[in-house]
Image (cartoon, helix red, strand yellow):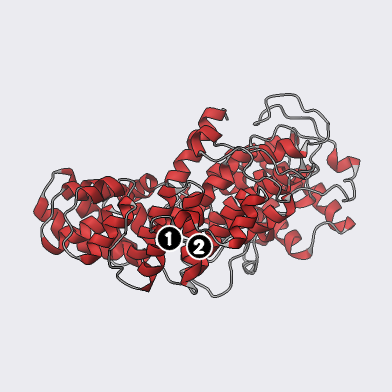
Amino acid sequence: MSATKAAAIASLFIGGATALCAQTQDAAPLSAIDWLSKSVAGPAASPLPPSVTTEPPVTSGVLAQPITVTPLDGPTLDALGLLPVSKTGLPRDLWGTTSSAGLAQLLRAERVDTVPAIQSLLYTLLLAELAPPSDSANRGDLFLARVDKLLDLGALDPAMALLELVEDPQAEPFRRWFDVALLIGRENQACDVMRATPQIAPTFPARVFCLARGGDWNAAALSLRTGETLGYVDKEMAALLERFLDPELFEGEPDLPMPARPSPLVLRLMEAIGQPLPTTTLPLAFAQADLRSNAGWKTRLEAGERLARTGAIPPNQLLGLYTERQAAASGGVWERVRAVQELDAGLAVHDTAAIAHALPEAWTHMEAMELEVPFAVLYGRALARADLPGAEGALAFRIALLSEDYEQIARARAPLDSDESFLIGLATGDVTGLTPPDQMGVAIQRAFLPGAEAAISDDFAKLLTEKRLGEALLMAIDRVTEGARGDLRDVTEGLQLLRHAGLETVARRAALELVLLERRG
């Protein structure tokens, strides 16, 4: 993948990082490091027997250049990114003196269910091409943490683009690349590359899978038996692989029990034996498997909505799913399809009455699914131009403030009440003398009063003095996110730091979203 194409993908996803991740369970979702396939043997693993490991090399795959066996340069790996400084506006030495391990820990701890503008900032930090931390070693801790957070967000395309920047094969980056390839339907390519990369020792399950995908069923069966004999394949995986290799032997047998914690490799194997796993209860990255063309429209719609909530797919991709064809039934996702299509049709012909009729229902559906910001990105500008009367016009104005054109739209609006005046003040950066609508508004106003951006908290000031701006930004992300659920002073301090760091647009959009979306946890 060219650097230009990779940067384009990154920009697309940052532009689409415009939604919240709805948590349906009290427990925190599994992190990527908990569900990755055990597809690659680590450096300390016992070597595979020659009878199993000896295979002719394959020339097809993504590795165009010859393989070189050299130690991976840690600073080079940690410095990889898709977005240059000219695109992000961030200083190249953003990470400064913060330790690699500390940054990795902070990134893995960052919540994915934050307001969209803050989420977009997180994407920028994950994809930026920056100088490595001053202590960066040859492990690539920060690089792997960035990839893992993208996987947690379900953003597999930018994760794949980032992983494909790695030139020298190494176990942990390749392990993640292999799993992403499985989830997006590129398993043949994943197996080709594994066979073409002798430095990467596959585990027995991965080898069995790839041998079978390549048509060498006898070698796959031999590998399975050898792995079982040596204790490298557990009982559950052996049963799954046996059915994968020879399903006819198990006709009439009961289905295998559903795995409690499937990996992408298990997902693909279960699908192959005719027991596909529903992804709705699996980590978000698995929803990407449901976007493949062989999935039904309803499955793709529901997966698209899940992924749009974290900005893992851009709003236009979600719109494409909503408008693909006419709704096939009633209730649930079909009502959302109808509502969006009705509004889209009214906007296409500039029918003010039709737009006013369709907008409230469509917005209600988007609120219920926490897809307000992707919706605003798609329709905000058009709604602002529709000049709707009354309550529908007021709703259209609020929706438009959630779009990229928020400031232009705010300056063109004559406020109807004090709440609109406050929103216009936030959008334009001047809230002096305005009346906040609630306590959240009060906390936000304090961050935008004249001189507030200079009055950062002592802990932030200390970090900046020690050249730890990146760490300070990650802390600001956390404070805005957590502060909205509890201590509103944290919201003020987080927004002040963002403004102090020159991220005025991020701060304004986050403030508008905190008021308009009322995300309080």
Residue that numbered label 2 is attached to? 493
**Residue 247 x/y as whole percent:** 65, 55
Give the amino acid type for the residue marked by disc 2 in the picture.
Glu
In which image quadrant can residue 61 be found? top right
Residue in view at x 73 percent, y 29 percent: 58
Label 1 near label 2: C-beta < 8 Å? yes
**Residue 279 x/y as whole percent:** 53, 61
| Residue 429 position (above or below residue 197) | below
| Residue 372 position (above or below residue 183) | below
Nearest the eye: 135 or 223: 135
**Residue 187 x/y as whole percent:** 62, 43
Give the amino acid type for the residue marked by disc 1 in the picture.
Ala
**Along the horizontal axis of the image, is 93 left or right of 344?**
right
Circle 2 SS class: helix
Which label was assigned to residue 447?
1
Residue count near mark 2 (Cα–Cα under 10 Å), binned few <14, some 14–19, many ≥20? many
